Image: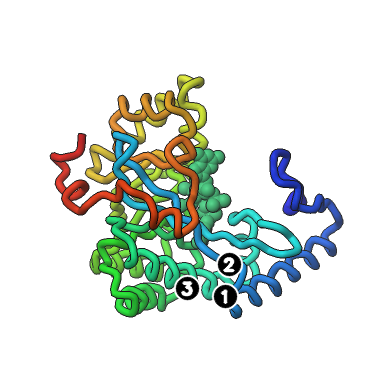
Amino acid sequence: DIALYEAKKNGRGRHQVFAGDMDDLLLRKRKVETELRKALDGGTGIGLAYQPVFAANGKTILGAEALIRWGHEVHGALPAAQFIAIAEERGMIGQLGAWVLQEACRFAVRTELPWLAVNVSPLQLRDAGFAEQVASILADTGLAPQRLQLEITESVLLENSDASRAALTALRESGVGIVLDDFGTGYSSLSYLRRHAIDKLKIDRSFVRLLDGEANAAAIVKALIDLAVALGVDVTAEGVETEAQKILLVAMGCRQFQGYFLSPPLEPAQLLGLSGLASPHDVVPAAARA
Ligand code: C2E
Ligand code: MG
Ligand code: MG
Ligand code: MG
């Protein structure tokens, strides 16, 4: 937390080094909170980037993930994970999450993307009205539930909360895809995979990063892919940065790829301008997957 505003070593130098005491940190968080509220209320300075997910051929776009961006005029572009954490802490994640869902679904209907994935905080899922909120956003925007995927983390499943479980069940029954994000980084209990219905696993980039150097990482990734195949769920490798990583992943049976090697997160207009958006018959039949 102390490093919250430390300049990224390779960043654009817009972050201020901040290593003050706790009072300062609290003050800074409150300030971020106030500014974030303003941005949300005014709909300014806040937006979504879209990172496409590719098939093994590196060309066919299977779908995309929405990633929040907040270009703050004073603080610069704060990393998503940092202001998401503040939003969670300050009780704003509900409002922020609703904005993200609305914006993402509105965008998705304008594209030929087979699906769009949206990250969901565990706190959103715990809210009793969450499944209904998603349903009403889908109805308002006209997006088919089958074209929305929600990315959750292992912590949601481990919480074992009735509200979260009921929300996941209702969403999945309505056709929304449930994706387990950052797979492998959470607690190592795999029993939730048996108890919970999941449509896709995303292998965390911390494993993918080590693929071409570390034998243990390669063994873990292979085991995770085999596990997904055995469970009959899709699997995406995230944070694919090199061709060597992609080649290894293809050889291990992975069929979905996301990362800087394929494409960084894009501005909405850039994504709309991309060719290679898969038509539905490119992605639906499992037999057609090369
Ligand atoms: P995530 O869901 O695991 O998203 C992937 C992150 O990896 C994104 O960072 C993306 O920009 C980055 N990334 C993609 N390809 C590569 C690569 O090849 N190499 C490396 N090093 N990084 C890559 P980002 O956008 O900063 O988001 C960080 C995290 O913040 C996300 O991790 C997610 O947990 C959270 N987040 C982002 N947007 C939202 C949102 O709308 N709602 C919620 N609740 N969380 C969000
Ligand atoms: Mg994600
Ligand atoms: Mg992820
Ligand atoms: Mg990750």
In this picture, is 53 found above or below 224? below
Is residue 115 something one can see in this rendering?
Answer: yes
Q: Residues within 10 Å of mark 3 (few under 14, many from 20)?
A: some
For the point 40% across and 25% down, the residue is 219
In this rendering, the label closer to the viewer, 3 or 2: 2
The residue at 46%/19% (across/down) is 215
Q: In this view, does 211 lie above or below 81?
A: above
* Spatial CA span between label 3 and label 2: 13 Å
CB of mark 2 within 8 Å of CB of mark 1? yes
Indicate whether 288 appears above or below 6: above
Callout 2: few (<14), some (14-19), or many (20+) C-alpha neighbours within 10 Å?
some
At label 1, the amino acid type is: Gly
Q: What residue type is labelled 3?
A: Ala
Task: Tell me the SS state at disc 3.
Answer: helix
**Label 2 near label 3: C-beta < 8 Å?**
no
Q: Nearer the viewer, mark 3 or mark 1?
A: 1
Residue beneath the point at 64% across and 61% down: 71
* Cα–Cα gap, marks 2 and 1: 7 Å
Alpha carbon separation for disc pair 3 and 1: 13 Å
Residue receiving disc 3 = 98
* Label whose residue precedes the other's in the sequence (3 or 1): 1
Image coordinates for residue 35, horizontal then vertical, percent: 69, 72
Residue 162 seen in this snapshot: no
Q: Name the residue under label 1.
A: 43
Q: Residue 235: x, y in percent?
A: 32, 42
Give the residue pinned by disc 2: 46
22 sits left or right of 247 in the view: right
Kind of residue at badge 2:
Ile
